């Protein structure tokens, strides 16, 4: 925490002491989201790329100079972060590009980028002396919180609110990690509202990502890590799918941090991608109007957020980066699940791959040039939502155990030559 100077309200600028359970500005209510501010001169003076390269901890805590955590808080043992990055010529070609770098954040311990924020929540809850952490979630924030809390071996309990539609894999994770799970009969907004009321009533630690300023700090480690993995030469574009807006807000925060301390020169442009059936942030980004709450009509459950709470930080981040927002259809998302899988061996959940469809659209519109360097983060693992994967994929060949029959089918399908 020695590098954190204060929290500031994004609405009125008022400054607050960085207490672990300081969530919103007193004066601005729901609009008064707080931002964690660092003393960048101090960070730059006491930290270097060499020191980072020599840091043994491979988890997100290797970036602790830019994280709001105390030195002595016990860290959750799960190995969050250090997810691999791949360059794929084949995928690039199919998207109309020369280069693309894919970071697979679905390989985090509970299978999504959300582990980065939830590990942070476990740290901050302990600093706040809380015994119970709670959140509402479309699924991944919940399962990652349950897993990271469980890794503390009984020190922390979780109460999780999910909408009725949460995919089976995510719900199964929650239950196996021993969370107290409340499946709210309604949409994500209903789950959110009930969680907010319960948290207020019982004083639990609040991991709701838009409200808790520390969650964005956890999420930003995905881009800090990408920068380090790419030797601080980031691509021209960085692409994320957008639900509540915290992930892309975190991406911007990482870029700002890295630039301020002189680790990078050039800042990539951010592309935020929403689903056509639920795109309130894209609409507000282009209209300049306040956000309008919309229905949640997409198979990409992790980004089906009709009433996003972090749209101000998200839109500001994308604009600051000279970036863009774009929407994609469910059909395109299914297609990208297949494309990513067959060209890279990475299995992403619908929201995890939605950004790829955005890239392809931006390339065909000429807004992303074919020789641009593009970086993309797969935000969630496909195994979490097998039902949609089965929708996306074709059926297997079903056949009697007969080799002659198999040969006939294979010739017909072109698997072998006749
Ligand atoms: C949460 C999530 C997102 C979007 O993050 P927001 O902070 O809600 O914008 C994208 N993909 C997956 C898999 C997620 O779980
Ligand atoms: Zn304020």
Image: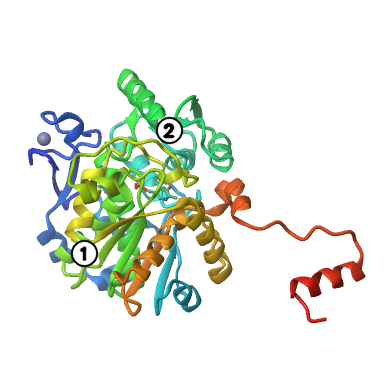
Q: Is residue 257 above or below residue 384?
A: below
Q: Is residue 271 above or below residue 190?
A: below
Q: Looking at the image, which residue sits at the far top?
A: 201
Residue 99 position within the rendered picture, expressed as x and y whole percent measured from the top left = 39, 77
Q: Nearer the viewer, residue 268 or 144?
A: 268
Q: Secondary structure at mark 1?
A: helix
Rendered image: mark on residue 156: 2
Q: Nearer the viewer, residue 57 or 380?
A: 380
Q: Is residue 187 above or below residue 380?
A: above
x 47%, y 31%: residue: 163
Q: Is residue 334 visible?
A: yes
Rendered image: mark on residue 258: 1
Q: Please tell me in which quarter of the rendered image ligand 2 is found.
A: top left
Q: Pick whichever of labels 1 and 2 is earlier in the sequence.
A: 2
Q: Secondary structure at mark 2?
A: loop
x 55%, y 53%: residue: 382
Q: Residue 272 vs residue 143: left or right?
A: left
Q: CA distance from mark 1 to mark 2?
A: 33 Å
Location of the C terminus by quadrant is bottom right
Q: Nearer the viewer, residue 138 or 104?
A: 138
Q: Nearer the viewer, residue 342 or 25?
A: 342
Dot 1 alpha-carbon crowd within 10 angstroms: few under 14, some 14 to 19, many 20 or more: many
Q: Residue 54 vs residue 137: left or right?
A: left
């Amino acid at each position: 925490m020695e590098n954190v100077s204060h929290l500031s309200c994004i609405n009125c600028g008022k400054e607050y002491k960085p207490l672990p359970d300081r969530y919103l500005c007193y004066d601005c209510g729901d609009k008064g989201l707080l931002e964690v501010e660092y003393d960048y001169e101090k960070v730059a003076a006491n930290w270097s790329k060499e020191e980072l390269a020599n840091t043994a901890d491979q988890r997100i805590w290797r970036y602790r100079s830019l994280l709001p955590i105390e030195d002595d808080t016990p860290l959750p043992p799960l190995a969050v972060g250090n997810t691999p990055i791949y360059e794929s010529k084949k995928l690039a070609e199919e998207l109309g590009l020369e280069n693309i770098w894919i970071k697979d954040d679905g390989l985090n311990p509970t299978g999504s980028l959300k582990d980065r924020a939830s590990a942070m929540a476990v740290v901050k809850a302990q600093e706040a002396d809380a015994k119970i952490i709670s959140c509402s979630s479309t699924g991944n924030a919940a399962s990652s919180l349950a897993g990271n809390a469980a890794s503390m071996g009984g020190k922390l309990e979780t109460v999780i609110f999910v909408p009725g539609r949460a995919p089976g894999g995510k719900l199964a994770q929650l239950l196996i990690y021993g969370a107290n799970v409340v499946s709210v009969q309604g949409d994500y907004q209903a789950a959110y509202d009930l969680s907010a009321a319960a948290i207020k009533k019982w004083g639990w630690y609040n991991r709701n990502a838009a409200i808790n300023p520390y969650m964005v700090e956890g999420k930003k480690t995905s881009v800090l890590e990408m920068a380090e993995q790419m030797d601080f030469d980031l691509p021209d574009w960085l692409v994320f799918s957008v639900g509540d807006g915290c992930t892309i807000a975190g991406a911007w925060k990482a870029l700002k941090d890295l630039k301020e301390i002189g680790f990078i020169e050039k800042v990539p442009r951010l592309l935020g991608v929403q689903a056509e059936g639920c795109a309130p942030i894209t609409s507000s980004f282009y209209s300049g109007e306040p956000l309008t709450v919309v229905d949640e009509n997409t198979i990409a459950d992790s980004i089906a957020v009709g009433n996003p709470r972090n749209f101000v930080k998200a839109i500001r981040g994308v604009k600051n980066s000279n970036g863009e927002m774009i929407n994609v259809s469910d059909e395109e998302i299914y297609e990208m699940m297949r494309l990513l899988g067959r060209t890279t061996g990475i299995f992403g959940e619908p929201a995890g791959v939605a950004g790829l469809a955005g890239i392809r659209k931006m390339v065909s519109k000429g807004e992303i040039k074919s020789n641009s360097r593009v970086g993309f983060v797969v935000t969630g693992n496909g195994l979490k939502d097998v039902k949609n994967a089965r929708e996306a994929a074709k059926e297997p060949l079903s056949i009697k155990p007969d080799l002659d029959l198999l040969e006939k089918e294979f010739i017909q399908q072109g698997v072998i030559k006749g």
